[in-house]
Amino acid sequence: MLKNNNPLGFMGALPSNIIKSIPEHQRKSITQQADAIFSDFASSVAYVHIEKHTHYSFHTEALRRYFPQIISNLNNLFNRGDISVSYIGSGAYKHCFMLSFGDNLENRYVLQTFQNVMNFDPDYCPHGVLYEPQNAFAVYKKYSHGRIAKPFMSHPSTKEILSNGYILTKYIDSNHSAKTKLGPILTRRTKITNTDIFSTDNTIRGISVDIGGFTENPEHITAPQIRYHWHEIAQILDKIDFSPKATDIHIRLCAEYEKYGDNFFNTTLWPKITRHFDTKDKKAAEKTLKSLRRLKIKREKLSQNDDWEIVQKYLVEDLKSLPFNTLSRIALNEIQR
């Protein structure tokens, strides 16, 4: 029986699909043994380094030589013969493997193991020394709103033993139901933010499969009441397309806005405002007009609140932070009124 020599205990539990197949009186023991197997495998592959975005056969074969042992250990532990392990990829700090318990797609998991990186920055979160394995559960439960792959078990490395940390998470692929992507305004003030410069590589169907780069967002609004009012308008702003492809629509709408003033928001004038748009642009312009009208109505209502000046300040900062903020001229003007 393997024993985990890591002085730090593991966190979490085996996935419920696996737990259900284990007699209740054996669950604690088998979970502890599974932790030891995962940690032993993590230690074995910790010294195999693969540069990000490369998959040299020599290095991947160096990882695969350890597969038979973990497969044998897991099959023996769970009294099965259908558990398999495959290599997914490697980053700067971790290797990722898929564990398959049979053919059921629901029984596929990701085992992320930490490499032995001797020159790591002790204040950087993805190296497996306490931060990432510990924070995985709190970030997922409290802050992610389902936009981070669910963690099941983890075991931190220590500063003395940099080679046996791991995280076991849900497997996410292109068949997974997608999460609605947050717009740029809401994203700017989420409670946590992803500082990983490769974060787009680590997102599948709107779900981050790597928690390593997540940290507290200094732009997050901590005051609940102010955050609530800010969110009411932020979600309206995120319905407006401020990207370069909408440049022509915004320029033409701005001209109409300056021409009609407050009457710009009178729906009876919209057919006249959009009459020279082609069919595709007309639909986009009408959608933008509806959002801008909602923005005006909501702003007029919220401006009666005592905390409006603070909310207004945050929204102005948000709009000015957009890469193409000149496109937000109407929205910015309405917020600042």
Image: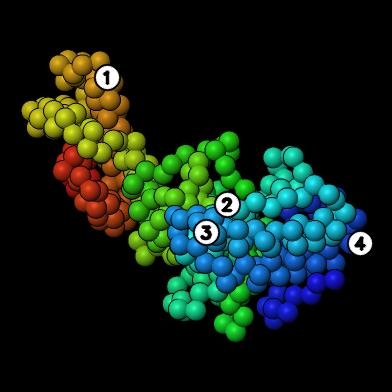
Q: Which mark is residue 90?
A: 3
Say which amino acid is labelled 2: Ile
Q: What element does badge 1 sit on?
A: helix
Q: Within the image, what quadrant is residue 24 found in?
A: bottom right
Q: Residue 175: percent from the left, percent from the top?
A: 58, 36
Q: Residue furthest left?
A: 259
- The residue lying toward the viewer, choosing from 141 and 201, is 201
Q: Residue 10: percent from the left, percent from the top?
A: 70, 70
What distance separates the C-alpha of mark 3 from that of mark 2?
7 Å
Residue hosting label 2:
88
Residue hosting label 1:
280
Residue hosting label 4:
25
Q: Within the image, what quadrant is residue 258 found in?
A: top left
Callout 1–callout 2 Cβ contact below 8 Å: no
Q: Upstream in the sequence, badge 1 or badge 3?
A: 3
When the figure is inspected, residue 295 is found, relative to residue 209, above or below; the finding is above
Q: Is residue 333 among the parts visible in the rendering? A: no
Crowding at dot 2, Cα within 10 Å, few <14 / some 14-19 / many 20+, comes out as some
In this rendering, the label closer to the viewer, 1 or 2: 2
Q: How is the image coloured?
A: rainbow
Say which amino acid is labelled 4: His
